[in-house]
Amino acid sequence: MISRREAPLRAPLHEQLREEFRRRISTGAWPDGSQVPSEATLCEEFKTSRGPVRQALAALRAEQLIVGGRGRAPVVHRDALSQPVETFLSFTEWATGLGKEPGQRTIEIAKRTASPVVAAQLGLADDVQVVSLLRLRLLDGEPTMVERSHFVLEAGQPLFGFDTDSGSTFRFLVEHGVDLHSARHTIDAVAADETDAELLGIPAGSPLLRERRVTTSSKGEALEYAEDRYRPELANFVVHNTLNQRAPLARVLTPGNPGETE
Amino acid sequence: MISRREAPLRAPLHEQLREEFRRRISTGAWPDGSQVPSEATLCEEFKTSRGPVRQALAALRAEQLIVGGRGRAPVVHRDALSQPVETFLSFTEWATGLGKEPGQRTIEIAKRTASPVVAAQLGLADDVQVVSLLRLRLLDGEPTMVERSHFVLEAGQPLFGFDTDSGSTFRFLVEHGVDLHSARHTIDAVAADETDAELLGIPAGSPLLRERRVTTSSKGEALEYAEDRYRPELANFVVHNTLNQRAPLARVLTPGNPGETE
DNA sequence: ACTGTGAACTTGTATAGATAAGTTCCTTTT
DNA sequence: AAAAGGAACTTATCTATACAAGTTCACAGT
């Protein structure tokens, strides 16, 4: 019963095709704006039926990597939004993907009792300890974002053995077996407090773009609660939606206690 | 050649099924948490093959309205983010969907030459006229958002024959044949200017959550450029993403001229 | 020169069937 | 009683085929 084949040796055909197509787009084998080979051609090339090919194309279509169709061959559309997942999970990988040099200065890393807000977001009792991290993030040397993240002990413990100024903490944690799987992001605006102002080199009270996120494991346990504050002149968020294709982004009423921060 | 069958009389089977299933979920015929009938059962009921049924279910699955599967029957999951599309296209329908009373006060509606920023966003020459609308939006009587929208003449013309304080302008325009199809939203933060401050009843300089959007027709022509500014204590944006499922939301570098507004 | 007709392509939709793989639950064996 | 086995269900994947519907383009007719 504990066969536990962690990584499936043979991914389904349509997934293989999807990744192959994605690779061809990202490497430029299928240049931006060019027509995608016809389904018949692809079936021929991969010796498969139309089902898996269409399923793979549909996935890319949902990401807007491919547009058009019905009659004429669809077209590669590789403009904006390239890596929408990594974008949100790792600042480092986001930055390098844009050709920028990511930097980070860890102001503080501590193990301490969770504040009420943090405890609530992580679903912990009030007297439980968490690993808290306060970092300044830079792009090409310019202060861009202040990150306050709080991990449950189980997930944050490995961080004390890691140079948090060196690389991607996200990748580090995943490689150490922390099951970071999904995240819920809340985006709003907030005025810079004294700390933000000093770190980012802006006047206190300046508007900042705030992203709060709760990262959970694949079983739904909250592992991290973080609050990132961006200089809006340097980074913002983009979403594209259509009448047909429903985006997993929603405008919501701000719940409960307004203004409270941490 | 001008057959122009605006509304297809017979939608594809899988779309009919999708809407029927969605209806059953929203009406409670398939209660939250209950198991969805098996594919075989649905094929039986609708006298169809598995293809369309699976295609319809896949669409709902992508919206997280249905979760689980493979072995056991999938389950209805009707909690969070319900109407992610209407959410972004119509303030009125978003508000009513939340059980709030939407309100709006039109400050100004005008036909005038587009400002450089607006012209650029709409892809127009500098001397072209647009229909500009400045509105204050309310939730249960409380000032919530300032909306500055600019329509190309073709799309905005009908607005002069419409009481812009009465209902959903989005619905009004769609019903008048304006082909509002998709939108690209950019989200950041900005300080309230004098106008914002007065309309929203907040101090000038307060941080506001800003959503700029370019709405385009199904052929890709820009029809509307709008800038909405929300009080962050009242509304914000939420996105949910996982390692597998790629969200069409991305964090991007703020392009070009920083700070410019209109 | 212009028009339009239609063949030959494309993708979209739907059917039918086969096999793989996961879950549930009852039965048998120990 | 507990564990092992297996039947009967489910969804996932894949194949093969057919027709509908939109696009492109060359060719014939005017």
Image (cartoon, coloured by chain):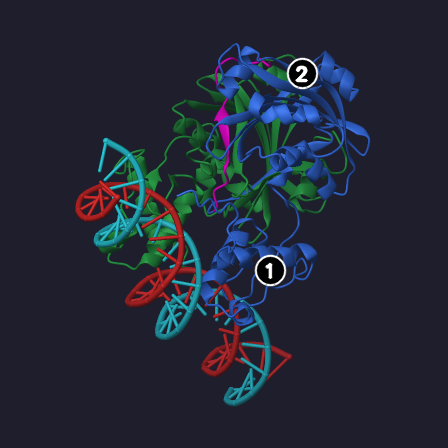
Chain colours: A blue, B green, C red, D cyan
**Foreground residue among A11 and B189:** A11
From the top left corner, tell me how far across and down residue A38 is, in percent.
55, 68
Q: What stretch is highlighted in magenta?
A: A245-262
Q: Mark 2 points at which residue?
A: A110
The quarter of the image holding the C terminus of chain B is top right
Three-letter code, disc 1: Val
Say whether residue A115 is visible: yes
Q: Helix or strand or loop: what does disc 1 sit on? A: strand
Three-letter code, disc 2: Ala
Give the image quarter of residue B92: top left
Give the image quarter of residue A198: top right
Q: In the orientation shown, which residue stands out farthest toward the right?
A: A141
**Foreground residue among A242 and A10:** A10
- The span from disc 1 to disc 2 (Cα, nearest Å) is 50 Å
Q: Helix or strand or loop: what does disc 2 sit on? A: strand
Q: Mark 1 points at which residue?
A: A75
The residue positioned 53% from the left and 72% from the top of the image is A44
Q: Does residue B151 appear left or right of residue A140 in this picture?
A: left
From the top left corner, tell me how far across and down residue B17 is, in percent.
32, 50
